[in-house]
Image (cartoon, rainbow, N blue to C red):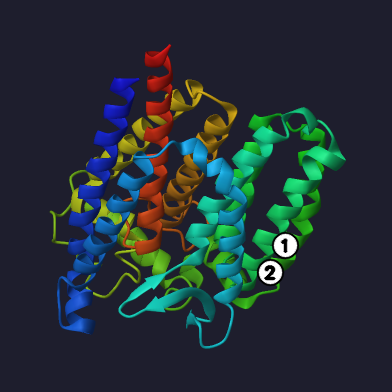
Amino acid sequence: MRKTRLTLFTVTLILICFGVVMIYSSSSLFGLERYKDSAFFLKRHLIYLLVGLIISLVIMSIDYRLLQRYSRLLLLASLFLLALVLVPHIGKEIGGAKRWFRLGIFSFQPSEFAKFSIIVYMADALSRRQQKLKSFLYGFLPPMFILGCCVGIILLQPDMGTAIAVTLVVFIMFFIAGIKLIHIVPVIISSLPVLYVLVFNVAYRRKRILAFLNPWEDPKGIGFQIIQSFIALGSGGLFGVGLGKSRQKLLYLPAAHTDFIFSIIGEELGFIGCAFVILLFVVFILCVAKIIINSPDQFGQLLGVGIVSMLALEVIINIGAATGSIPTKGLPLPFISYGGSSLIFNLASVALLLNISLTKFKSVKAS
């Protein structure tokens, strides 16, 4: 397992360093134009990175199984913060959504903490209820109730992308834990009409779907962002126009350093750069899969499944949105996009995965 840990650590480090370079490249002009500082976003990103590394070191210094003892407390804290962000004058509203707390020049997104807490809680609950999981009433219904409460509050922000991602991850954990498909599938099918209403009865979500289906119908309106992303990716060709030489980041492509940083990678580093990033994530997932298989207990296994499922979904959704494969969603590219809260909890998640692997190593060594 030492080789797997070393590979996972190395891949994560490369992704982080790659992200630092691309955040500066994609945000320098925007930072200079809006804040009179070309390194504005880079400086903040490095501070978040430092905080994430400190938290990761703390996580690495303890036994990850202690999280089982505090899983309920973590969940209650995340629910409290999710509710608190909706309170007027406390939560920061941006673009009609209340998803952030403003702490001076920094912001904190409680939904990132909620994703982490829900995964920890579900891993604990499912491992504790192993003998009851086949039962609909005692095994499936209680965790579904908790999931419904969390997703409901997230939808009130509103943040449908995170709500869908959390739901999919928990369902994956349900399946791996042993909950019957006959309990899971009807819930998924019955939720489709609700999903339809949530999408097509809300103007901006409906516009996203229309932009996804035909962005050229309104190239200066709802289709503008995805068209600019296409231009960026197409301009890059095989080898790219060169690091720092993107033209789409010259205030053409909105969210160039956050949701659409993959498009800037494609423009500056070309298909080779994009393929390199995707390969790194594939290696990351394979390393985590090996750690999950060798995890010392079911809690560790389900925790690993939840973490890697969430990271993989965020990668798929972010790259899919940038390439026009799925409708645009506001999810960052893990370790690479600018986003303080997501970076901190992604680093904490990697620390947990390494902790699981080390615990296995310690157990074997002790025996």
Residue extending furthest toward the top: 367
Q: Residues within 10 Å of mark 2 (few under 14, many from 20)?
A: some
Question: In terms of image quadrants, where is residue 243?
Answer: bottom left
Report helix, strand or loop for mark 1.
Answer: helix
**Total number of numbered discs in the rendering:** 2
Along the viewing direction, whichever of 41 and 147 lies nearer the viewer = 147
Q: Which label is found at residue 196?
A: 1
- Please report the residue visible at 32 percent of the width from the left and 28 percent of the height from the top: 5
Place of residue 310 in the rendered image (x, y in percent of width and height, measured from the top left): 50, 46
**Residue that mark 2 sits on:** 200
Whether the residues at callouts 2 and 1 have beta carbons within 8 Å, the answer is yes
- Please report the residue visible at 32 percent of the width from the left and 35 percent of the height from the top: 279
Q: Residues within 10 Å of mark 1 (few under 14, many from 20)?
A: few
User: Going by the image, does 111 lie left or right of 122?
Assistant: left
Report helix, strand or loop for mark 2.
Answer: helix
Place of residue 352 in the rendered image (x, y in percent of width and height, measured from the top left): 42, 39
Along the viewing direction, whichever of 140 and 21 lies nearer the viewer = 140
Along the viewing direction, whichever of 331 and 109 lies nearer the viewer = 109
- Please report the residue visible at 61 percent of the width from the left and 46 percent of the height from the top: 121
Place of residue 311 in the rendered image (x, y in percent of width and height, measured from the top left): 45, 45
Residue extending furthest toward the bottom: 89
